Amino acid sequence: MTDNSRIATIRIKNLRLRTYVGIKEEEVNNRQDVVINVRLQYDASQAIRNNDIDAALNYRTITKNIIAHVEENRFALLERMTREVLDIVMAPAAVKNAMVEIDKPHALRFSDSVSVSLTANRED
């Protein structure tokens, strides 16, 4: 059984990228800003016990994978992009659960942004 004091929460905050997202002609033809926030948890017991980078979750690799995927693809829906980013975050077997929220700034008049968030949990 896992000691909850060993469950690490990692947050990737306000990752600002540019991609194609939307269905209107302007959105299909021009990159737009998106802001990605990720929260994930993993069992950090080995990393804490051994003080060893190889035992820790490599959030840099996860972030690089998110950047490459978002910037190299086109998305009709924010929901689809959010699901694909969540799949990237959940790919390492060590990740127990995760939440991804993606904001599309200025998507609506009089609004700072519109966002979609999705969560996933891995069964033990």
Image: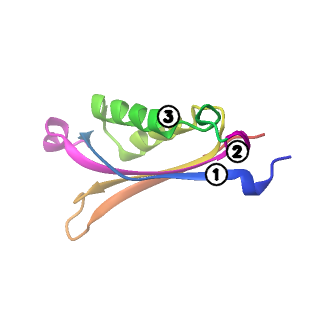
Q: Quadrant of the C terminus?
A: top right
CB atoms of marks 1 and 2 within 8 Å: yes
Measured from the top left, where is residue 50 in percent x and y? 70, 39
Q: From the viewer's perspective, tell me whether residue 87 is left or right of residue 41.
A: left
Q: Position of residue 103 (x, y in %)?
A: 34, 55
Label 2 Cα crowd, 10 Å radius (few <14 / some 14-19 / many 20+): many
Q: Is residue 8 above or below residue 59?
A: below
Q: Is residue 46 magenta?
A: yes
Q: Amino acid at mark 3?
A: Ile
In this view, the residue farthest toward the right is 1
Left or right of 22 on screen, residue 40: right
Marking on residue 8: 1
In space, the residues marked 1 and 2 are separated at their CA atoms by 6 Å
Query: Which residue is located at x 47 percent, y 35 percent?
Result: 62
Which callout, 1 or 3, points at the residue further toward the start of the chain?
1
User: Looking at numbered disc 1 in the image, what kind of residue is underneath it?
Assistant: Ala
Residues in magenta, as a range: 22-50
Q: Position of residue 39 (x, y in %)?
A: 53, 52
For this rendering, which residue is in front, 57 or 115? 57
